[in-house]
């Protein structure tokens, strides 16, 4: 559960001001219960999405993290990047990005890693599977996060525990978002179907 210390309250106040300045956005729903999770950022169609999700999470005292290039984690600017939630990754390391994030989950007591599964603001026909393999390998749930530009609200749904049955797990994710996920986006035409290539094989390999 997110904690509300003095610094968190200050950050929350700053985030509320940011959300008002961006048109009156607000967080809706309950605070996430698990202390660790892979958080989906859906839909992802504009440069505003990341800033909005960070501000919404901080407005309820929730600290979220996201992956950045290794070069962005080097001093002196790296201190700032890490301080606001950036997690540097080395793509050349053995086991790749997935392995590094599984290790990061293992060493932290509280960790919300936000990943836009489309991997881009442009329309794609398949989600990237990195979020799935990280959550499965780290044995943490997936939190379906959302931004609804129609109502200017965002939040996180109930945690989804992955089983390794890709199609069944994706069905659970699709059930949460429903058929109108594109309508929530700032640019609906950039939102493709919610599916992964692994579903066609019926397993979590790849």
Image (tube, rainbow, N blue to C red):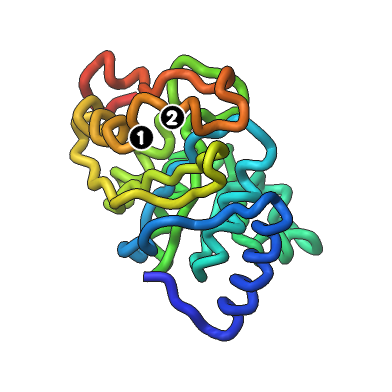
Q: Which residue is located at x 60 percent, y 60 percent?
A: 85
Look at the image and tell me whether residue 94 can be seen: no
Look at the image and tell me whether residue 62 can be seen: yes
Q: Which residue is located at x 61 percent, y 26 percent?
A: 187
Residue 170 position within the rendered picture, expressed as x and y whole percent measured from the top left: 28, 30
On the picture, is 89 further left or further right than 128?
A: right
Q: Which quarter of the figure is the C terminus placed in?
A: top left
On the picture, is 198 further left or further right than 202?
A: right
Q: Which residue is located at x 67 percent, y 42 percent?
A: 48
Residue bearing mark 1: 177
Q: Quadrant of residue 180?
A: top left
Residue bearing mark 2: 181
Q: Which circle marks residue 115 in the picture?
A: none
| Category of crowding for the residue at label 1, using alpha-carbon neighbours closer than 10 angstroms: few (below 14), some (14–19), many (at least 20) | some
Q: Nearer the viewer, residue 185 or 79?
A: 185
Q: Nearer the viewer, residue 81 or 12?
A: 12
Mark 2 and mark 1 in contact (Cβ < 8 Å)? yes
Q: Which quarter of the figure is the N terminus placed in?
A: bottom left
| Category of crowding for the residue at label 2, using alpha-carbon neighbours closer than 10 angstroms: few (below 14), some (14–19), many (at least 20) | many
Is 177 above or below relative to 126?
A: below
Residue farthest to the bottom? 6
Q: Which secondary structure, mark 1?
A: helix
Q: Which residue is located at x 58 percent, y 78 percent?
A: 9
Distance between the alpha carbons at the discs numbered 1 and 2: 6 Å
On the picture, is 137 further left or further right than 74?
A: left
Q: Nearer the viewer, residue 77 or 151?
A: 151
Is 43 above or below relative to 161?
A: above
Residue 91 position within the rendered picture, expressed as x and y whole percent measured from the top left: 57, 38
Residue 179 position within the rendered picture, expressed as x and y whole percent measured from the top left: 35, 24
Q: Which secondary structure, mark 2?
A: helix
Q: How many marks?
A: 2
On the picture, is 188 further left or further right than 167?
A: right
């Amino acid at each position: 559960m997110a904690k509300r210390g003095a610094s968190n309250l200050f950050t929350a106040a700053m985030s509320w001001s940011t959300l008002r300045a961006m048109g009156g956005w607000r967080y809706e729903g309950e605070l996430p219960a698990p202390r660790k999770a892979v958080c989906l950022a859906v839909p992802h169609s504009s440069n505003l999405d990341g800033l909005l999700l960070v501000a919404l999470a901080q407005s309820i005292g929730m600290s979220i993290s996201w992956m950045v290039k290794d070069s962005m984690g080097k001093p002196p600017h790296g201190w700032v990047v890490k301080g606001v939630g950036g997690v540097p990754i080395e793509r050349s390391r053995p086991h790749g990005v997935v392995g590094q994030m599984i290790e990061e989950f293992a060493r932290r007591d509280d960790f919300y890693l936000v990943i836009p599964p489309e991997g881009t603001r442009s329309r794609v026909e398949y989600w990237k599977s990195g979020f799935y393999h990280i959550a499965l390998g780290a044995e943490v749930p997936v939190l379906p996060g959302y931004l609804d530009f129609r109502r200017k609200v965002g939040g996180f749904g109930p945690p989804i525990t992955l089983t390794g049955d890709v199609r069944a797990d994706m069905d659970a994710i699709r059930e949460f978002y429903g058929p109108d996920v594109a309508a929530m986006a700032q640019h609906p035409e950039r939102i493709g179907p919610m599916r992964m290539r692994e579903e066609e094989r019926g397993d979590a390999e790849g």
